[in-house]
Amino acid sequence: MLKLWRKYLELLDAELSAKIFDNLKNLLVIALLFAAGAESLHGDHRIFLGLFVSNLTGWGVIAVSALLLALNMSDGLHRLAKLRYHTALQVLLFLLYLIVALRVVEIVWSYRAA
């Protein structure tokens, strides 16, 4: 037990909590961007002084958020690959990313519908 506690303290010294919170913050922002892009697909109004239709802008925002999600996820998975038992942690992180991202999109859609 003492060995696990020392490893935990080493990870805290390496700013583990700051990295986790930064990664989670990025995930939430990306999920909100995705929800905003998906929501603009339902509108018929023009954006940017009438130059773009909302569908085009919505797909653009979705594409950018998908690219940012892939970048954020690959960064998190790469950092986990350096740890012991990294495969299990990587699978767990991937599932957590998927669940949190889908849930944030659902929450944004439910607030928008209300």
Image: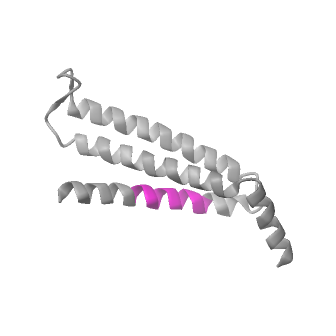
- Relative to 80, 27 lies left or right: left
Above or below 5: residue 57: above
- Relative to 109, 83 lies left or right: right
Quarter where residue 5 is shown:
bottom right
Which residue, as the protein is rendered here, is positioned at the far left?
Answer: 44
Is 50 one of the magenta-colored residues?
no
Q: Quadrant of the N terminus?
A: bottom right
**For the magenta stretch, what is the residue range?**
91-102
Q: Main secondary structure of the magenta part?
A: helix
Q: Nearer the viewer, residue 17 or 104?
A: 17
Q: Residue at x 50, y 56 (%)?
A: 97
Q: Nearer the viewer, residue 80 or 33?
A: 33
Q: Residue at x 56, y 47 (%)?
A: 73
The color scheme shown is one colour
Q: Position of residue 29 (x, y in %)?
A: 44, 47
Q: Nearer the viewer, residue 33 or 71?
A: 33
Is 98 one of the magenta-colored residues?
yes
Q: Residue at x 52, y 61 (%)?
A: 96
Q: Quadrant of the C terminus?
A: bottom left
